[in-house]
Image (cartoon, helix red, strand yellow):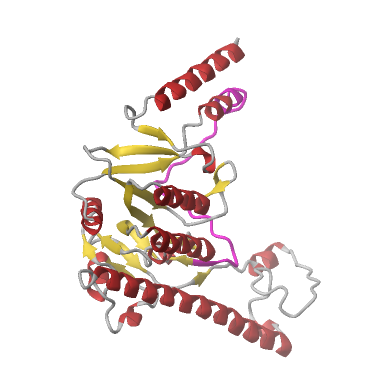
Amino acid sequence: MLSFILLGLIAVWFVGRVVIHGMAGMASHAFIGADTLQNLEEVVIEQTNTDNKIAVVEVNGIISSGEALRGDTDFVGYIKEQFKLAQSDPAVKAVILKVDSPGGEVLASDDINRIIRLFEDKSGKPVVVSMGSLAASGGYYISAPCRWIVANELTITGSIGVIMHNYNYRLLFDKIGVRPQVIKSGRFKDMLSGEREPDNDKLTAQEIKDRNEEETMVQGLIDETFDKFKEVVKTGREWAAKQNAGEGRTLAADWTKYADGRILSGKSALEYGFVDELGNFDTAFKRARTLTGIPSANLVEYRFPPDLIGTLLSHVAGQTQAPALKLDLGIDAPKLQAGVMYFITPIAIPH
């Protein structure tokens, strides 16, 4: 009986989607096409009497490419597809990048940075950043190539730097009587391992020398990535200043003094030239219209269509399982991997 009910609900859902997408110009959802990633839908979130559109792309939470959002699509892929759709639609005149993120993985942040740069270069359409409560480290890294950056004066931003986070649990092993046995092919094959003896007074002279050399190598890697971060900021802000012809802010002469990992308020970021304007999302929307010379525009987003079938199947399967108990602390702890470099503000790292 349950299977018949489930099939009936699926049929109703399918027919409903065909009807909705067949009513061109009458619904707030527009089907993008089967050749796009996961069949993203264009959703009108604010409609006016115009054909012009401004697309909104959101970056919320930890920037990562590790977890799939839908099927094989990860977060970076989802961002890339949204910019592809915005580029291919001539009615889309600009993109507003809504950033509320403490940062994330170095590679994922760099991929999104590159996606935005290529979009602006190929389409000629401006990307305007609307910073939320937090747009720090990797959140700023992906903002740097954009044409215009808007921050609230209380936005936490900056935190320009690189961090590699790890734990050493050897003392815990010693306390419970566990000794790691390591067979390796080279002196540095176990570098950054949390199993190693942390106290130098228990190491041989050669082991101490190896540790010092290892620290120098890792610090060099961090410094190299940090130099890339500063180059991204410098290149992005200089390009934006040239495009804005003196209307936005330029980097302060001593801006690198503030690119030492410290967090900045939106107000301070404006003073040092890291952002162009103070305001909120409405400010960014107005600025996007000004940059493109259009008096009004529809605001649109690209979203995955509702996965009713998956939801129903999960619900049916869940009837045979005990309900999970979840404790909501009001925050989502970031899943940071040991030994991976991050553009992330330390306040987002759990201790």
In the image, what residue occupies the spot 54% across and 34% down? 324
Quarter of the figure with residue 276: bottom left
| Left or right: 326 as drawn, with respect to 167 | left
Q: Residue at x 24, y 61 (%)?
A: 154
Residue 336 on the magenta segment:
yes
| Residue at 64% in and 86% down | 213
Please, what is the dominant secondary structure of the magenta stretch? loop
Residue 233 drawn above or below residue 45: below
- Magenta-drawn stretch contains 276: no
**Quarter of the image that includes the N terminus:** top right
Judge by depth and name the residue closer to the eye, 181 or 235.
Answer: 235
Is residue 28 visible in the rendered image? The answer is: yes
Q: Which residues are magenta?
A: 314-342
In the displayed structure, 147 sits above or below 198; it is: above
Q: Provide residue 215's location: percent of width, then percent of height.
A: 60, 82
Q: Residue 275 at x, y = what percent? A: 28, 67
- Would residue 348 be visible to someone looking at this image? no
